[in-house]
Image: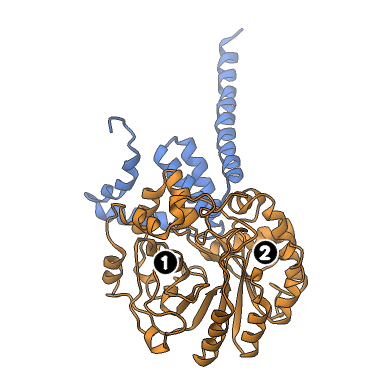
């Protein structure tokens, strides 16, 4: 398992250093200019339809592309006051979806309580699951809990074969992930008519863009069924963002400039409308608010914290943008729900 | 760059359309249709393109379809098998021409 940037005291463990590295790139255009040409000058939010809460940076894995720089030794955990305020706003604002992420969000000591309370409010709950957490002692009953709560599981699996998966996510991750997926399937997840949704996420294992989501989904379904007897609902293709450990990979491999040029060249004006920052509020472990999880990791916070904010502050707010935003507008677009433009 | 093949040349591919835009547009439309999902998937088509790229020994095409194959969901094992197919056809093609060689030799020989 690779150490986190933070443990290595790497220069890119500091958000300002990441921003500076991106800012100095000689790109053909800025994101703000590109968005303006697409009719968004400035890019603004619509309404808050998803509360995405990052409950902490602790994770049982250290994936090479992780934009959170999550890992086992990370100490950031959402405190009780912030948890309570998140649930309070979820109720007050009538936001339909709670998206729980991390790190491995299940490692938060109140994860199950958060899920259960949000479900009692009638909200859709999404768990962004790394799969292997369900194979760790003390967490093996997670699939049953998630099924009982009818939580939508969005699970990471970059490839349907071991080599690429383990390259990105760590040795042995593929085998554990398949075991986890089989357990989810046994409970009805990913099976027609069960109502239990299991969606997979694939990020490219390297400095290239994801392919067509529908085409890859067909391949993934066929190959996961054929090779491993695994079923799932949807495949989400997500572009790797030039942030944190993927930024480190881009720099070390000499791919940074070319990758960014590729993102800029692949800018798709049609992807701007569906940007997730427009209908999502990202909440950090400490109660800071952000336009998205990527801005969160770059510490591009909104002016008010979760304790001060009002819904009116958020609707139609200008989105904070930077060069990294080209990651969400390249090709068919990219978001926490996969591609944003139909191909 | 003082070589016949400049890696940056691929990015200038569109310049080929400057003096024959209608032909270029037709080529682009046809090219796009060829590589769309059909009876073969995008991934399978990319692997064929990668194998052909090696056969025609086009460095631009090799770079482009190495990336495209990854993007379309192929892995290095699939890509390596694809170029073995190309190599086998190349090798087989040489050997099967040996029949012509043998026929010619037999005609001349006593």
Image point (25%, 54%), residue name: B21
Give the chain coloured orange. Answer: A
Front-most of residues B42 and A72: A72
The image position of residue A180, as x and y in percent, is: 72, 64
Q: Which chain carries label 1?
A: A
Q: Which chain carries label 2?
A: A
Tell me: A162 left or right of A275.
right
**Can you identify the residue that label 2 sits on?**
A131
Give the chain coloured blue. Answer: B
The image position of residue A50, as x and y in percent, is: 50, 80
The image position of residue A318, as x and y in percent, is: 33, 77
Image point (65%, 68%), residue name: A107
Front-most of residues A313 and B97: A313
**Can you identify the residue that label 1 sits on?**
A299
Callout in the foreground (1, 2): 1
The image position of residue A27, as x and y in percent, is: 29, 55
Q: How crowded is mark 2: few (under 14 residues within 10 Å), some or many (20 or more)?
A: many
Image point (73%, 72%), residue name: A143
Front-most of residues A300 and A41: A300
> Does dot 2 land on a helix, a strand or a loop?
loop
Q: Can you tell which quarter of the image residue A317 is in?
A: bottom left
Where A24 sits versus B87, above or below? below
């Amino acid at each position: 398992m690779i150490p986190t940037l933070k443990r290595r005291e790497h220069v890119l463990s500091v958000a300002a250093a990441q921003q500076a590295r991106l800012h100095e790139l000689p790109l053909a255009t800025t994101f703000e200019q590109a968005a303006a040409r697409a009719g968004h000058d400035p890019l603004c939010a619509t309404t808050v339809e998803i509360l995405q809460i990052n409950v902490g940076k602790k994770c049982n894995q250290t994936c090479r592309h992780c934009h959170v720089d999550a890992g086992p030794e990370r100490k950031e955990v959402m405190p009780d006051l912030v948890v309570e305020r998140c649930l309070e706003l979820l109720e007050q604002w009538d936001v339909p979806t709670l998206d729980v992420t991390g790190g491995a969000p299940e490692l938060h000591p109140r994860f199950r309580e958060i899920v259960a309370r949000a479900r009692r409010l009638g909200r859709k709950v999404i768990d962004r699951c790394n799969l292997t957490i369900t194979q760790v002692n003390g967490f093996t009953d997670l699939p049953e809990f998630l099924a009982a709560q009818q939580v939508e599981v969005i699970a990471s699996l970059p490839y349907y074969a071991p080599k690429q998966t383990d390259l990105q996510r760590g040795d042995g991750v593929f085998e554990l992930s398949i075991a986890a997926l089989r357990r989810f399937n046994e409970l009805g997840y990913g099976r027609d008519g069960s109502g239990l949704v299991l969606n997979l996420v694939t990020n490219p294992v390297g400095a290239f863009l994801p392919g067509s989501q529908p085409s890859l989904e067909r391949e993934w379904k066929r190959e996961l069924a054929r090779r491993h007897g695994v079923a799932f609902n949807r495949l989400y293709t997500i572009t790797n963002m030039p942030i944190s450990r993927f930024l480190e990979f881009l720099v070390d491999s000499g791919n940074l400039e070319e990758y960014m040029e590729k993102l800029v060249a692949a800018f798709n004006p049609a992807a701007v409308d569906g940007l997730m920052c427009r209908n999502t509020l990202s909440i950090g472990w400490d109660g800071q608010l952000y336009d998205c999880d990527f801005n969160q990791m770059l510490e591009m916070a909104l002016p008010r914290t979760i304790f001060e904010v009002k819904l009116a502050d958020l609707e139609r707010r200008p989105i904070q943008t930077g060069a990294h935003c080209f990651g969400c507008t390249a090709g068919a677009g990219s978001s926490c729900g996969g591609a944003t433009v139909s191909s | 760059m003082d070589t016949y093949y400049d890696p940056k040349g691929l990015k200038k591919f569109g310049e080929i359309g400057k003096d024959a835009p209608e032909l270029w547009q037709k080529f682009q439309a046809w090219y796009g249709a060829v590589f769309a999902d059909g009876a073969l998937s995008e991934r399978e088509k990319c692997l064929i393109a990668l194998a052909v790229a090696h056969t025609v020994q086009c460095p631009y095409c090799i770079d482009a379809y190495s990336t495209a194959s990854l993007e379309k969901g192929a892995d290095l094992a699939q890509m390596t098998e694809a170029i073995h197919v190309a190599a086998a056809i190349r090798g087989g093609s040489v050997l099967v021409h040996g029949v012509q060689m043998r026929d010619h030799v037999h005609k001349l020989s006593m």
